[in-house]
Image (cartoon, rainbow, N blue to C red):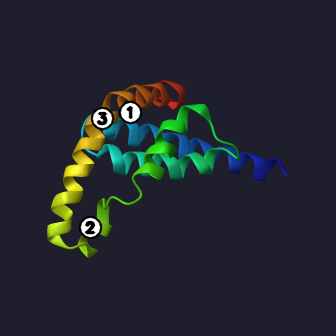
Amino acid sequence: MAEANEEHREYLLTVQNQVVDVCEAILCGETSVLLGARTLSRLHYELFKQIDDDFVLFIGIDSETDNLPIGDERKYWNEKVLVEKDKEIAEYEARVGHEVFDACQKLINRFSSR
């Protein structure tokens, strides 16, 4: 039983490191705000059974923007529609960017073991 607990603890540490990596990628512009938020929302559910306050913003962004194409899914969208959706994405990211950067820094401070 102790071995299983240790494996689970190691897994959680790996996920926490992924959270830090995604946040750092958002902050330095390697990952878009929306793609990062979707990834952080998914990672949140790997870490917690209930919603954690530090992830509420990312879960909300994921929910509010699930109609916007990002990442690999863009290859399935019409080019003309993508132009309009890209405008929506840019406007949304501009509106939430400051909050996202602050929330990313908070998660880095919380989970960073570096």
Residue nearest the viewer, comparing 15 with 66? 66
* Amino acid under disc 1: Val
Answer with left or right where residue 110 lies relative to residue 38: right
SS type, badge 3 = helix
Question: Going from the N terminus, do you reach mark 3 or mark 1 first?
Answer: 3
Q: CA distance from mark 3 to mark 1?
A: 10 Å
Q: Is residue 18 visible?
A: no
Q: Nearer the viewer, mark 2 or mark 3?
A: 3
Image-quadrant location for residue 12: top right
Residue 50 picture location, percent across and down: 69, 43
SS type, badge 2 = helix
Question: Going from the N terminus, do you reach mark 2 or mark 1 first?
Answer: 2
**Res 74 label:** 2
Residue under label 1, please give it.
100
Are the residues tagged 2 and 1 within 8 Å (C-beta)? Answer: no
Going 72% across and 46% down the picture, which residue do you hit? Answer: 6
Image-quadrant location for residue 51: top right
